[in-house]
């Protein structure tokens, strides 16, 4: 698997870097960043409990399941928020707006800040391995078994019209927690826009899988950012969002 990922890394260096443009822009943290919504489910799952760091840092008013007037939800999954960030391999971590975070989280932050959407971090009950090889093996095993890892965070999506789903490509498809998200929630009538980060696979099977699994939603073409280009992709992402009418 390491060989495969190395090959993907080389391939990605040869590919157009960031969406349809290879220009590398500079990042600038907006004065107003996005709000985190969602709650961490309590251990007995009988009631919602707000215990995640991001939620704990938010004001009391923000600690609600829906929590906002925004019609846009930016839901993201990144292993850096599902394990021990400090131990996460640098391939899956970027210093963005002055903080270390996963690639998918950085992209989600840009989308949420630009669109005024709410951020929701999809976190799993299980911790993913921080060692890269262990992670790729774990992800492969989950995928082969069709495991839907239980989500530890929850959000009320009823008020949102548009849901951006931001995640790394894992083994040529979406990470299993995204499949859980699709399984657990009703996306009928919503506009789903997939956004991936990857090392060569681009959108992978995102659009076809989402369309198959959510026939009553409208699925956009989406956008992809190569992992090595996340650090400089803010302008390109904003330009794409502008073109999409956001
Ligand atoms: C388990 C695993 C499987 C991966 N499979 C692929 C793949 O099939 N295609 C690809 O282009 N990149 C693949 N990658 C690379 C990640 O998609 C890429 O490094 C991404 O930028 C990581 O984002 P993150 O920091 O949010 O985890 C894989 C990475 C991991 C950890």
Image (cartoon, helix red, strand yellow):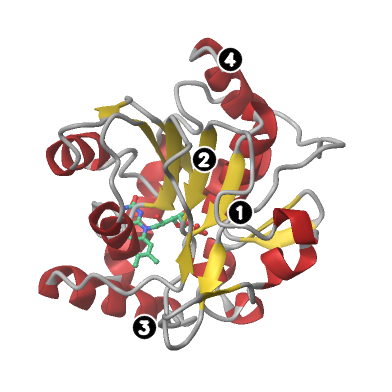
Q: Compute the Cα span from label 3 to label 4.
A: 39 Å
In front: mark 1 or mark 4? 1
Instruction: Look at the numbered disc 1 and give the secondary structure of its residue.
Output: loop
* Cβ of mark 2 under 8 A from ligand 1: no
Q: Compute the Cα span from label 2 to label 1.
A: 9 Å
Q: Quarter for ligand 1?
A: bottom left
Instruction: Look at the numbered disc 2 and give the secondary structure of its residue.
Output: strand
Reading the chain from its start, which is encountered first: label 3 or label 1? 1
Count neighbours of disc 3 (C-alpha within 10 A) and say few if under 14, some if 14 to 19, many if 20 or more.
Answer: few
Q: What's the mark number on residue 134?
A: 3
In front: mark 3 or mark 4? 4
Reading the chain from its start, which is encountered first: label 2 or label 1? 1
In front: mark 4 or mark 2? 2
In front: mark 3 or mark 1? 1
Res. 24 visible in picture: no
Q: Are marks 2 and 1 in contact (CB under 8 Å)?
A: yes
Instruction: Look at the numbered disc 3 and give the secondary structure of its residue.
Output: helix
Reading the chain from its start, which is encountered first: label 4 or label 2? 2
Q: Are marks 1 and 4 in contact (CB under 8 Å)?
A: no
| Image location (x, y in percent) of residue 37 | 61, 54
State the residue in front, 97 or 67.
Answer: 67
Q: Compute the Cα span from label 3 to label 1.
A: 30 Å
Q: What's the mark number on residue 37?
A: 1
Q: What's the mark number on residue 242?
A: 4
Q: Residue at x 62, y 28 (%)?
A: 115
Q: Residue at x 26, y 42 (%)?
A: 204
Q: Compute the Cα span from label 1 to label 4.
A: 24 Å
| Image location (x, y in percent) of residue 159 | 48, 37
The residue labelled by disc 2 is 73
Q: Residue at x 82, y 35 (%)?
A: 30
């Amino acid at each position: 698997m390491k060989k495969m990922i190395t090959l993907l890394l080389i391939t990605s260096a040869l590919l157009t870097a960031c969406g349809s443009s290879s220009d590398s822009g500079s990042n600038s943290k907006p004065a107003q960043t996005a709000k985190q919504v969602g709650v961490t489910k309590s251990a007995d799952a009988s009631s919602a409990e707000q215990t995640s760091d991001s939620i704990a840092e938010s004001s009391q008013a923000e600690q609600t399941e829906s929590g906002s007037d925004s019609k846009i939800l930016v839901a993201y999954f990144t292993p850096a928020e599902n394990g021990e960030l400090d131990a996460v391999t640098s391939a899956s971590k970027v210093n963005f707006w002055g903080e270390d975070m996963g690639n998918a989280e950085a992209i989600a932050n840009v989308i949420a800040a630009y669109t005024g959407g709410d951020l929701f971090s999809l976190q799993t009950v299980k911790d993913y391995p921080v060692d890269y090889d262990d992670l790729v093996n774990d992800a492969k095993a989950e995928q082969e078994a069709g495991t839907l890892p239980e989500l530890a965070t929850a959000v009320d999506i009823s008020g949102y019209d548009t849901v951006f789903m931001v995640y790394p490509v894992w083994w040529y498809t979406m990470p299993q927690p995204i499949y859980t998200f699709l399984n657990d929630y009703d996306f009928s009538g919503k506009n789903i826009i997939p956004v991936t980060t990857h090392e060569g696979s681009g959108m992978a099977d995102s659009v076809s899988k989402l369309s198959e699994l959510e026939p009553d939603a409208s699925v956009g073409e989406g956008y992809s950012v190569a992992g090595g280009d996340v650090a400089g992709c803010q302008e390109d992402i904003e330009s794409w969002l502008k073109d999409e009418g956001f």
